[in-house]
Image: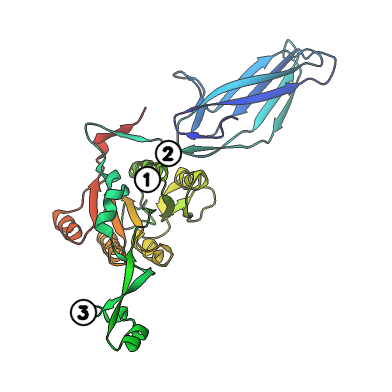
Amino acid sequence: VAPDRLIAGEPLVATVRVANRKPVPLPWLDVRLFLPEGIEPANVGVGQPRGFVNAGFAPRGLERLSVRFPLASVQRGAHAIGPLRLRASDWLGFMSIEQTIDVKIPVIAYPAPLATRDRHLSSHRPLAETAVRRGLLPDPLRFRGVREHQTGDPRKDIHWKASARLRVLQTKLYEPATSLDAVFLVNVASYDQYWIQADPESVELVVSAAADLVRHAADAGRQVGLVTNGIDNLTHERPRSALARGPRSLQRSLEILARLGPYAVNSPEAVFLAERGRIPWGATLIVVTPKISTGLAGAVLALRRAGHRVLALSISPASQEMSTHLIARGIVLDVLHPAELRRAG
């Protein structure tokens, strides 16, 4: 199958190679390749079968041939094409031999990009370096010197050894945090009762929006990481992608998004706050969520207080009171309206 990694909506081709190792021709051979949900025959018409593709022909003696099946990926996810059924028979069909080959060919369909109508997606702006100027927070790992202590300086920043040497209180100075790290926090829970309720349509928008932002950050040369409370449809575990730069990191993040199901393993606030110790100081955090619940709002405020620039991108707008509260504390908010979105292409 080529390609075996593609964006949902793109075409692919499955090639079946058949060899008749005997000098005697076969009167008839039927080849049927079964397709999983999410992969369909290309240009399939109304009423035509979508779960398989097949071809029939009469191989000559010692003939080798290839059968190409044009396919289309219509849904994101990790798919397995197969099995393959071979059926040989005589011209009249009175006698036949059938064999099923248990082959599973993996195909990863990444989330399809979104397009907005008459509107620039302002959520991309905090990923640009213009966002760094408002996030010039001191990085405690980048010590650059001392200065004389001033009223209001935190006690924890006093450099005691330098103060003893100079006999005057000295305060530590740090380089500003200029992290180019972008950590995506993807929430698939649309309801507070995440363990029994799910909204697949909202999850698809969240996943596609997150994939767009991940691509944008990777193209800008940033290190990219991804944390989610969703469940991998294949492993049935909660996946994560560590911070890294380059094509492999981008591929890992997109594969996680491709395989996410609509159900959550835990609340977003519990998962995201548990990751605080693993997120570099000064990293930009992009929360992509169906809605901003009270618990999630508390979590993003805690992450902001921890020294991160935080963007919260939601499908449903937060209440006016919550929006005012978050914006006043440095959280950047943006909303994706489903009515404004369509698949790019």
Distance (Cα) linking label 3 and label 2: 53 Å
Please tell me whether mark 2 sits on a helix, a strand or a loop: loop
Residue 131: assigned label:
none
For the residues carrying marks 3 and 2, which lies nearer the camera in this image? 3
Determine the image quadrant of residue 81.
Answer: top right
Task: Report the residue at 36% width, 44% height from top.
Answer: 213
Q: Does the CB distance between marks 3 and 2 fall below 8 Å?
A: no
Q: Position of residue 54 (x, y in %)?
A: 61, 21
Please tell me whether mark 3 sits on a helix, a strand or a loop: loop
Task: Report the residue at 68% width, 20% height from top.
Answer: 66
Q: Position of residue 29 (x, y in %)?
A: 71, 18
> How is colour applied across the structure in the image?
rainbow
Residue 210: assigned label:
1
Amino acid residing under circle 2: Pro
Residue at numbered disc 2:
111
Task: Report the residue at 28% width, 76% height from top.
Answer: 147
Please tell me whether mark 1 sits on a helix, a strand or a loop: helix
